[in-house]
């Protein structure tokens, strides 16, 4: 019988399958790193994994704490600076990057800066970091959204997706032709962008999720693929890899904190602290 | 600053002498191994009115803002503790109207430092950002946040940012010599440009090493001694963040910080305990070990994994061979002097 899997495992593995052998990948922390490590281990051995802090061709051994975590691997092949990481992206050497999303509109434009007014924020989010430049110049971008929202109008436009849809991104002359987001992965399903209109549509639903529950999250009339199906099942090999490489990712944040706090507490008790 | 000068001093002295109220202060580290103890000392000395530059804020920006040191923040990324339900010192200060913030992308921020480092007045950045609110919404930088020019060669519209030359940089590295030659390795980020763009540089390091160590590994030196004003040896100077080759991130301490940071009162209590309550890093480490035990620090010490040595050797280090003969002319020094006399080359 095939192995059963958590939602977190499904998301990681679905993202990992977007990475093709030989591609250059900019990773972020969490899901992207685990996805990258899995791809490299299982189906894309010649992928080059890099982080914007300037560590390149890494083979992470444990999940990194952040994007400058050289402690997560035993050495790496090329040390450069942040400036060169972005000029390398600008010149077209980055195939795939991953980006977390707080707000997304129907054409894949992204907000990661603020909820509410920019100058008097209801909630101040991290900001752009590398996002705006990566989404501009990586050949393709994989978006992930957990706890974010679909909106008609972004509170703040941090990173460019397909602008006003159609050919507006290419027509602007500001971006490499054909670049942009290719997929949005949420806790409920997989979305892609219509080839012509560049509008988000629902391509796959995760097991146990109804299309109606997804429609409720989207403030416009969401289009659904004619061939809508359930998100492809992970293989046992993929699940095994994720569990061994990133056990804390496999169980999900909530369970990690619960078990982690109990463990820290018990250890402190044992030390008499 | 002359190379021969010994610049070793305490964090107290370095911050007192080289960080002034209303300075533009840049944190040289990016995400990893932040200059925690230098940051703490800025807060203890109650520096005011700073314009803070931070490539990516971790807990360092949070405590500087909560400590009332910062009026203006230039950054690309700020931390948020605890997701939606949580908060941050930056968010609380913005809501209270005590902090102004200017957002850039990672590259744009760094491009300002790179321009400053090289003495240029501006730098070209990636034009895609022109369609975003980064370009449209401007805080205290106003018109000077970005300017668009036309490329003199292609005619293309080019997005630019102005150079930044902060008054002072505080930065933590693995090792330095007493002259200030600072060696840093791992995720290079923007450590070199942030440091070299600045007018004054305070380096803290895990260890001060002999000059000879630096000379044998110049590829690791990111800040040359002649640019450095102060060198401070602070073991565990980046704790609870990590330093490659020394220690890992202290996840327990980090988690406790971010739980505290979710509220203003929580963060104040944390700062009372760990910053104001500890006069220096020794006191901080003593307090840490008294509270958590030495085991937690031992658990994050690294196992060594040395870089393969690069061979800086040469065929010889003297013009005179083992027999005392000059390598090109084949004569001894005495013979050479005799010939110079005979040829009438000597005066005086």
Image (cartoon, coloured by chain):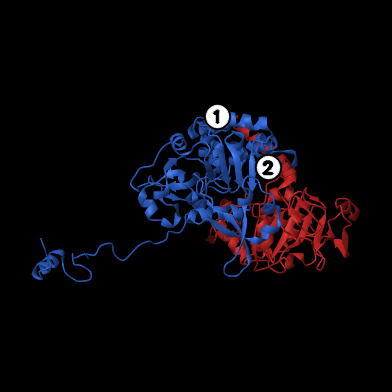
Q: In the figure, is residue B292 to the left or right of B16?
A: right
Of labels 2 and 1, earlier in sequence is: 2
Residue B87 badge: none
Asked whether residue B77 is in view, the answer is no
User: Vertical placement of B227 versus A49: above or below?
Assistant: above
Residue B276 badge: 1
Q: Secondary structure at mark 1?
A: helix
* Quadrant housing the N terminus of chain A: bottom right
Q: In the figure, is residue A40 to the left or right of B296?
A: right
Q: Are marks 2 and 1 in contact (CB under 8 Å)?
A: no
Write down the chain letter for disc 1: B
Asked whether residue B132 is in view, the answer is yes
Kindly give the residue lying farthest to the left in the view shown.
Answer: B342
Residue under the image location 88 percent in, 61 percent down: A224
Both on one chain, marks 2 and 1? yes
Image spot of residue B179 (x, y percent): 38, 46
Image spot of residue B81 (x, y percent): 68, 40
Shade of chain A as shown in the rendered figure: red
Badge 2 density bin: few <14, some 14–19, many ≥20, Cα 10 Å: many
Residue nearest the viewer, comparing A39 with B331: B331
User: Vertical placement of A57 versus B266: above or below?
Assistant: below
Residue B80 badge: 2
Image spot of residue A193 (x, y percent): 80, 63
* Quadrant housing the C terminus of chain A: top right
Residue under the image location 54 percent in, 50 percent down: B164
Write down the chain letter for disc 2: B
Shade of chain B as shown in the rendered figure: blue
């Amino acid at each position: 019988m095939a192995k059963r899997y958590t939602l977190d495992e499904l998301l990681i593995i679905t993202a990992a399958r977007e990475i093709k052998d030989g591609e250059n990948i900019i990773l972020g922390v969490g899901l992207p790193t685990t996805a990258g490590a899995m791809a490299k281990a299982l189906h894309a051995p010649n992928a080059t994994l890099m982080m914007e802090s300037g560590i390149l061709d890494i083979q992470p051994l444990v999940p990194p704490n952040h994007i400058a975590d050289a402690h997560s691997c035993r050495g790496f092949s090329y040390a450069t600076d942040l400036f060169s990481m972005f000029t390398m992206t600008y010149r077209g050497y980055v195939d795939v990057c991953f980006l977390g999303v707080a707000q997304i509109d129907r054409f894949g434009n992204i907000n990661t800066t603020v909820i509410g007014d920019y100058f008097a924020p209801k909630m101040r989010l991290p900001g752009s970091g590398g996002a705006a430049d990566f989404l501009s110049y990586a050949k393709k971008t994989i978006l992930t959204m957990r706890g974010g929202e679909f909106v008609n109008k972004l509170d703040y436009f941090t990173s460019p997706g397909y602008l006003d849809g159609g050919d507006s991104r290419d027509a602007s002359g500001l971006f490499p032709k054909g670049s942009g987001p290719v997929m949005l992965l949420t806790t409920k399903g997989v979305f892609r962008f219509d080839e012509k209109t560049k509008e988000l549509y629902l391509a796959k639903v995760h097991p146990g999720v109804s299309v109606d529950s997804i429609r409720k999250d989207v403030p416009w009339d969401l289009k659904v693929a004619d061939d809508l199906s359930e998100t492809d099942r992970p293989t046992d090999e993929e699940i095994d890899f994720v569990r061994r490489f990133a056990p804390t990712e496999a169980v999900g944040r909530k369970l990690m904190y619960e078990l982690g706090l109990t463990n820290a507490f018990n250890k402190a008790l044992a030390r008499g602290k | 600053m002359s190379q021969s000068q010994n610049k070793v001093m305490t964090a107290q002295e370095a911050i007192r002498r080289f960080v002034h109220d209303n300075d533009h202060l840049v944190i040289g580290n990016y995400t990893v191994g932040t200059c925690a103890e230098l940051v703490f000392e800025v807060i203890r000395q109650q520096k005011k009115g700073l314009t803070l530059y931070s490539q990516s804020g971790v807990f360092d920006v949070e405590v500087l803002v909560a400590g009332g040191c910062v009026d203006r923040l230039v950054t690309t990324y700020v931390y948020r503790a605890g997701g939606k339900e949580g908060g941050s010192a930056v968010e609380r200060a913005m809501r209270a109207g005590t902090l102004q913030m200017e957002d850039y992308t990672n590259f744009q921020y760094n491009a300002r430092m790179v321009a400053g480092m090289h003495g240029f007045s501006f730098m070209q950045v990636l034009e895609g950002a022109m369609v975003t609110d980064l370009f449209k919404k401007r805080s205290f930088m106003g018109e000077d946040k970005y300017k668009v020019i036309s490329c003199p060669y292609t005619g293309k519209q080019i997005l630019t940012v102005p150079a930044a030359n902060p008054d002072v940089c505080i930065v933590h590295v693995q090792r330095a010599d007493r002259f200030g030659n600072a060696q840093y390795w791992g995720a290079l980020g923007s450590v070199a440009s942030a440091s070299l763009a600045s007018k004054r540089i305070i380096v803290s390091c895990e260890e001060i090493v002999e000059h000879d160590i630096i000379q044998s590994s110049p590829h690791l030196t990111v800040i040359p001694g002649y640019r450095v004003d102060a060198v401070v040896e602070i073991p565990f100077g980046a704790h609870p963040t990590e330093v490659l080759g020394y220690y890992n991130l202290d996840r327990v301490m980090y988690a406790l910080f971010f739980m505290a940071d979710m509220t203003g009162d929580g963060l104040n209590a944390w700062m009372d305990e760990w910053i104001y309550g500890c006069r220096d890093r020794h006191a901080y480490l003593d307090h840490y070990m008294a509270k958590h035990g030495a085991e937690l620090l031992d658990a994050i010490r690294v196992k060594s994994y040395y870089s393969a040595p690069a061979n800086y050797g040469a065929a010889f280090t003297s013009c005179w061979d083992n027999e005392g003969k000059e390598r090109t002319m084949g004569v001894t020094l005495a013979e050479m002097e005799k010939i110079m006399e005979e040829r009438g080359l000597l005066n005086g």
